[in-house]
Amino acid sequence: MRTVFWENNELKMIDQRILPARFEVVSYRGHKEVAHAITDMVVRGAPAIGAAAAFGLALAGYESASSSTSGLLADLQTAAAVLKSSRPTAVNLAWAVDRIMTVAGKMKEERNVDQLRLLILDEAQKLADEDVQINKRMAEHGAALINDGDTIIHHCNTGALATVDWGTALGVIRTAHEQGKKIHVLVDETRPRLQGARLTAWELEQYGIPYEIITDNMSGYFLQAGKAQKVFFGADRVAANGDVANKIGTYMLSLAAYDNGVPAYAVVPTSTIDLSLAHGDLIPIEERNPNEVLDIQFQGEPVAPKNAKARNPAFDVTPNRLITGIVTENGVVYPPFEVNLKGVVK
Ligand code: MRU
């Protein structure tokens, strides 16, 4: 099953807020509800939110009462702005919305209003199907970097749940496992939303890949002790110089990997590479509700004092010097990233 899919004129998505306790699929008929689902992290992961937004535009097409293609396009533009503003860091979201809007804009003279609605849905479906193919190509390139017997530290969730299917960094691990390589994954919890402990562990169980959960602050210990040979993660946006914005904690993990001579790879579709931004300081970093940090319990009691305040930046930027290679569907890119990234972005 796919994480994000179209069925019976509705957008359907696996509800990632409640996994692994319950597996539920939720249905959407309006683009505003889709935008809210992205903000609320029913769906999360850069490629998955891109696909959700693309289908959100298809819904906006059907929501529009316009009988002219220019009226439909105006309604779509409003919907595009709503969808784009749902989360700021992952460039895949804006990339997907822009791709659909470009196709709609080009065809508005050649199609009638109903044909245009269908065309938008077709394009969203194409984008979703391509995501799966791209992930499988990345996985082949990335799996070649994994040796039999490797222990890999993985951050956040980058699997089928973070994409339409298969995954980015976790897709690499999955393909290496399917190739018969004996691998072990140290799954870091990924505070505060625990995408590692909840979602990555759940996926690894489905695939039969051996793993253990570690708290985020244990990575340095395992790297220093020589107990992990590789670090793999995804990204929400890669700047033109190879600086990588990814889930909060990626920077600290990459520092510890670098200090111990352990290679750290980012696995990203080229739609995650934003050549318009020269370096990572220009990437917008989402700051989420502090309750995500505070609403955690220990032995049934809240961990923090009642009036505690908290900060909650959802992403950080890992400077390019800490990244060994960037795996894309068009091959693995090595430094100097400012030169070599241009070669893989078509
Ligand atoms: O806040 P999230 O769960 O959407 O963050 C997801 C990540 O940081 C992933 O590592 C990233 O989107 C790339 S994986 C497909």
Image (tube, rainbow, N blue to C red):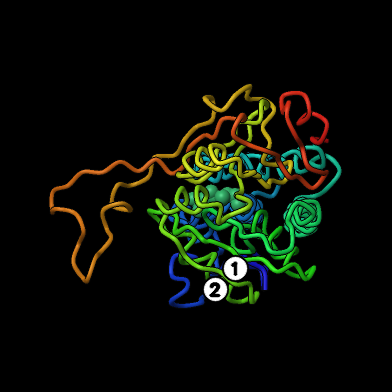
Residue at (44% x, 59% y) in the render = 189
Asked if residue 134 is positioned above or below residue 254 in the image, the reply reads below
Give how far across and how far down residue 292 sits, in percent: 33, 53
Asked if residue 295 is positioned above or below residue 323 in the image, the reply reads below
Q: Is residue 325 left or right of residue 22?
A: right
Q: Residue furthest front?
A: 225
Asked whether residue 122 appears in the rendered view, the answer is no
- Say the numbered circle drawn on residue 12: 1
Residue at (73% x, 56% y) in the render = 146
Q: Which residue is mark 2?
A: 25
Q: Nearer the viewer, residue 226 or 331?
A: 226
Which element is circle 1 on?
strand
Asked whether residue 132 appears in the rendered view, the answer is yes
Q: Quadrant of the N terminus?
A: bottom right
Q: Residue furthest top?
A: 278
Q: Is residue 333 left or right of residue 264?
A: right
Give how far across and how far down residue 234 sits, in percent: 61, 48
Which element is circle 2 on?
strand
Alpha-carbon neighbours of circle 1 within 10 Å: few (<14), some, or many (≥20)? many
Nearer the N terminus, badge 1 or badge 2?
Answer: 1
Disc 2 marks which amino acid?
A: Val
